Amino acid sequence: MTICVISPFTGLAGDMLLAALVDAGAPLDRIRSAVATSGLTGWELRVQSLLTHGLMTARAVVDVADEATSRSAAELIAMAGRVEPAPVAERSVAALRAIADVEGRLHGEDPEHVHLHELGGHDTLVDVIGVCAALDALEVSTVYCGALPLGTGTVRTAHGLLPCPAPATAALLRGARTVGSDLAGETVTPTAAAVLKAVDARFEPPPEFRLLATGYGAGTRSLPDRPNVAVVHLGEPVAAGHRTLVVLETNLDDVTGEVLGHVAGGLLAAGALDAWISPVTMKKGRPAHVLHVLAEREHAARLADLVLAETGSLGLREYPVRRTALARATETVDVLGVPVRRKRGPHGAKPEHDDVVAAARELGLPARVVATIAAGR
């Protein structure tokens, strides 16, 4: 399993990300082959070295024989759907559908029939499929991205001058982490924003990882005081490292103990990593409880809906936490002829309580005696 951490130093465009991934080790022949399966003709993808401000970078160049720059979204999506392997096609289609949906909303058109102008050329298809193919070839499981710098001023489009970031980019970046930039013009392109959306990029600190490779992808614009680059780091998560999870909390002063127990059990069954209840005193001296839920980020919204539906609460809190998880393994030991599972970590072993109770009942012994034997103490 490999993670990819994107550092958008001066911004992010599809060609910058593609070049950075190739510079970090993505095989160019695999990328070209994936693009070719779409049926796109009249193109050639090159990645060349470029020295800028003392930094050696990679630059992705698409040479095009067909000068058409305007196609329908449906045409691009159909071509992406033919791509092999299937995971690359799935992500490529998701990125292009995201662009079509946004353009359709902005221009009041059906996404299936929306006509793409600047985004309808070869470059868009090559960049989208190329990045997805590179991530697939590198066996990237999760993408993390730093805050995206948003430029100022205007960008010229087929519809005239528009404010930066372009409306399509702004819509695609909803929910992403951004930061202001002193650079004028477009610093994040719709293509890059759509790819980040399609790969479900996480805008949060990555877990602890072992750095494997770094790549630098240069953009087309030259800047007077800095290299115009996006950086990617490829890494291998450390087995006993840190992970960023989400804690959901809500204060409850009108929910019975029976309901609280039911909700906690239901949350665990629904995929929560943990759920627990703390007694508190709320305003006006009311005795109450706080329901806590520990969850993976991708499950947080679904579990939050479950909490609100089951408790009737009018709101909850959500915040990231950093958890350290040590390596552990489950093994089975023999206790006087009865199997008992126990969980072993680097600092000891603990038998599973349910197995201990069942073995104690079968052997006619106190549970503490069975637990002591199973733990090996």
Image: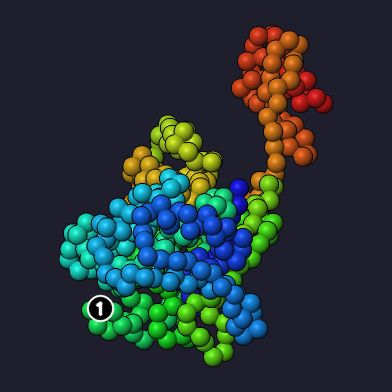
Q: Nearer the viewer, residue 282 or 122?
A: 122
Residue 173, percent from left and from top? 38, 66
- Residue indicated by mark 1: 158
Residue 147 visible in the snapshot = no
User: 359 above or below 215?
Assistant: above
Looking at the rendered structure, the secondary structure element under dot 1 is loop
Residue 81, percent from left and from top? 35, 50
Query: What residue is drawn where x is 69% and y is 37%?
Result: 328
User: 181 above or below 135?
Assistant: below
Q: Nearer the viewer, residue 50 or 244?
A: 50
User: 138 above or below 162?
Assistant: above
- Of the 4 image quadrants, the one containing the C terminus is top right
Q: How is the image coloured?
A: rainbow
Query: What residue is drawn where x is 61% and y is 60%?
Result: 25
Residue 143, percent from left and from top? 52, 57
Query: What residue is drawn where x is 32% and y is 73%?
Result: 67
Q: The disc labelled 1 sits on which kind of residue?
A: Ala
Would residue 254 be found to the left or right of residue 146 on screen?
A: left
User: 265 above or below 245?
Assistant: above
Residue 195, percent from left and from top? 42, 61
Q: Nearer the viewer, residue 156 or 68?
A: 68
Residue 269 visible in the snapshot = yes
Q: Nearer the viewer, residue 94 or 348?
A: 94
Q: Residue furthest bottom?
A: 224
Would residue 121 be found to the left or right of residue 35 on screen?
A: left
Query: What residue is drawn where x is 43% and y is 48%?
Result: 84
